[in-house]
Amino acid sequence: MPETLLSNQVGNIPRPTGTCYLIGRLDHALKRRMLEVLAPLGLTVSQYTALSFLESQTQISNAQLAERTMVSPQSANEMVKQMGDKGWVERAPDPFHGRVVRLSVTVAGTVVLQQAHAAVAKLESGMLTGLTKPQRAALQGSLRSILQALSTPKVAPDQPE
């Protein structure tokens, strides 16, 4: 293993440990594998994420969906249109805000989502097969902590903390 992965400093210059690179590779590999299991259902990874999020909410706006699925509002709007054309989501005007459109999963969307959940659960199980239950729990806890750390606003790099 290269020295820079074991040490985070070379001389007086701080160096990355390789964690960001490893997480990036993991993200890329996971998206590729998820696409492999979701494509036969006619779903993209973003559509699966969107349907999963919509399933857990009573109704949300397109802007909220864009934020949760990590796409631009324009891309989310196109994705919602495609899922609407497939009969997976419904759009309805918000009764309290004239310009807001609320989204919800249809029965057909729920059916495809359940199939997708099963496919992703199988992928996840295979991905974690080498880990014990305590290791899986620790991994999930660590990933949540990292996500929280990255989601918390920080002081600009050139300003003291």
Image (spheres, rainbow, N blue to C red):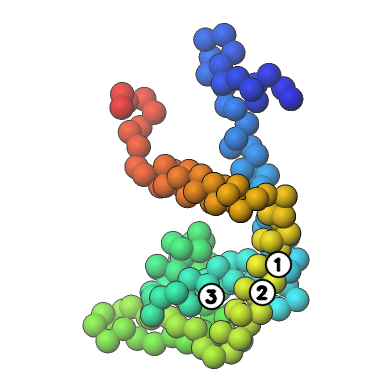
Residue appearing at x 47%, y 87% in the figure: 90
Quarter in which the N terminus is drawn: top right
Q: Quadrant of residue 57?
A: bottom left
Q: In this view, does 44 lie above or below 92?
A: above
Q: Position of residue 126 (x, y in %)?
A: 73, 59
Q: Which residue lies furthest to the left in this view?
A: 96
Look at label 2 and name its amino acid. Ala
- Marks 2 and 1, how far apart in space? 6 Å
Asked if residue 14 lies left or right of residue 123, the reply is: left
The residue that disc 1 covers is 122
The residue that disc 3 covers is 51
Q: Where is residue 145 in the image (x, y as percent from the top left)?
A: 45, 45
Q: In which quarter of the image is residue 22?
A: top right
Question: Label for residue 118?
Answer: 2
Q: What element carries label 3?
A: helix
Q: Which of marks 3 and 1 is in front?
A: 1
Q: Quadrant of residue 88?
A: bottom right
Q: Is residue 75 above or below residue 19?
A: below
Asked if residue 78 lies left or right of residue 131, the reply is: left
Neighbour tally class for label 2: few under 14, some 14-19, many 20 plus, Cα within 10 Å: few
Residue 143: in sight, yes or no?
Answer: no
Look at label 3 and name its amino acid. Leu
- Marks 3 and 1, how far apart in space? 18 Å
Q: Is mark 2 on a helix, strand or loop?
A: helix
Residue 33: in sight, yes or no?
Answer: yes
- Front-most of 48 and 146? 146
Q: Position of residue 124 (x, y in %)?
A: 67, 61
Q: Nearer the viewer, mark 2 or mark 3?
A: 2
- Front-most of 4 and 91? 4
Given contact means CB atoms under 8 Å apart, are the residues at marks 2 and 1 in contact?
A: yes
Q: Which residue lies furthest to the top in this view?
A: 11
